[in-house]
Amino acid sequence: MKCLWLVAMLAACGHQRPQQSGGGDAAGTGGDAANTGGDGGLGGDGGLGGDGGGGHDAATGQDAATGHDAATGHDAATGHDAATGHDASTGIITGGPCISGAMGATGYRVRWQDGGGTATVDYEVDGLPDHSRDHTSAAGYQIGFSPSFVDPFLGEGGVALDDSDFIDIEISTAGISSIAKATLSIYGRSYNTTASGSFNWQTFDGTGSTADDFVSNVAPYQWYSADMTTEISPGDNGVYLRIKSGPASDALVVNRIELCLVAQ
């Protein structure tokens, strides 16, 4: 009887061992196992499995790190809705927020700096799609004109702009399909001890101006912004923008000029 009992026990033990490597709920490779099973470490929704290893929802699947909704996908950091995409808050204009506080993004900004008493141009931002035209200059009606850098003590200083000279800006709006809003801003003050001033502008599309006495003659410098949406067109590779001073003072000191656009 002892022999028969021992044979029966050996047979029972031998029947149970295969479940350690292939059974449904066992630890090694079974359906719910820790390493490769349906809901285990690599299975189901895990790293590599079928809903485990190589499945669509896994780490290499379509919704994973390299998939359509992942870090390199269409809606991710480099996608169309991301910080650099066309549908981001700045649209097609890449110059960043406008320091004047105007709506949209910086399409163009220049600063006038001191070149030994002569005002020279520092091209700070060109956020337009087409950079083929990027030129700003100050010119006068008299022969031998040279733009003067003035007012270095009450403010940052800038180019003197009065009724005998003007500033020309040449840019391109090629690559822009629509402009919902365009804002022209200057940073400076009226260069007159007794009167405020203003500024006006003209392009091939039209003219515009601020109200008289719009620009204060009191330091410190401030930003003064005006809507010029109807005076600039999209898709124009030859935009000429001329800026002049206006009443009452007819004299300004201009440190910066900024063009802000809401555009696509």
Image: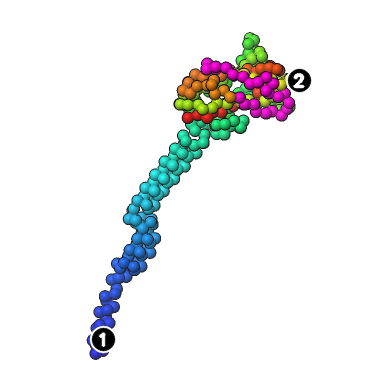
Mark 1 surroundings: few (<14), some (14-19) or many (≥20) residues within 10 A: few
Q: Position of residue 21 (x, y in %)?
A: 31, 68
- Viewer-closest of 197 and 84: 197
Whether residue 114 is visible here, answered yes or no, is: no
Q: Position of residue 50 (x, y in %)?
A: 32, 55
Is 222 contained in the magenta span? yes
Of pointers 1 and 2, the one earlier in the residue sequence: 1
Image quadrant in which the N terminus is located:
bottom left
Furthest residue in direction bottom, as rendered = 1
Span highlighted in magenta in the image: 202-226
Say which amino acid is labelled 1: Trp
Q: Which residue is mark 1?
A: 5
Q: CA distance from mark 1 to mark 2?
A: 120 Å
Q: Secondary structure at mark 1?
A: helix
**36 lies left or right of 79:** left
Number of the front mark, 1 or 2: 2
Quadrant in which residue 181 is drawn:
top right
Residue in the picture at 69% in, 28% down: 221
**140 lies left or right of 172:** right
Say which amino acid is labelled 2: Thr
Furthest residue in direction right, as rendered = 194
- Viewer-closest of 109 and 195: 195
Q: Which residue is mark 2?
A: 194
Whether residue 61 is visible here, answered yes or no, is: yes
